[in-house]
Amino acid sequence: MTLEGRPVTVISLVVADGIVQTIYLIANPEKIARLGWSGTSKDG
């Protein structure tokens, strides 16, 4: 999810043997800001 081009929610999956074991949802803007989001995609 984004708001004004910045992420507001991050989802992380822990997968083992092709099965999702754990789902983490981070919706804390202060923690997400530490990820260093640049607002651009490295894929183009």
Image: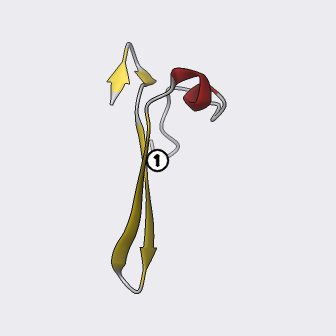
Report the residue at 43% width, 73% height from top: 15
Residue 11 in percent (x, y) is at 40, 47
Name of the residue lying farthest toward the top: 4
Q: Quadrant of the C terminus?
A: top left
Decide: is 14 above or below 37. Answer: below
Q: Element under label 1?
A: loop
Decide if residue 1 is on the left or right side of residue 34: left
Decide if residue 36 is on the left or right side of residue 12: right
Q: Which residue is mark 1?
A: 43
Crowding near the residue tagged with mark 1, few <14, some 14–19, many ≥20 C-alpha atoms within 10 Å: few
Way the structure is coloured = secondary structure
Decide: is 28 above or below 4. Answer: below
Residue 41 in percent (x, y) is at 48, 38
Task: Give the quarter of the image for residue 8.
Answer: top left
Residue 19 in percent (x, y) is at 33, 78
Task: Give the quarter of the image for residue 5.
Answer: top left
Q: Name the one closer to the observer, 1 or 26.
A: 26
Report the residue at 40% width, 33% height from top: 9
Identified by mark 1, the residue type is Asp
Q: Name the one closer to the observer, 12 or 36.
A: 12
Residue 40 in percent (x, y) is at 50, 30
**Res. 37 in view:** no
Q: Name the one closer to the observer, 13 or 43.
A: 13
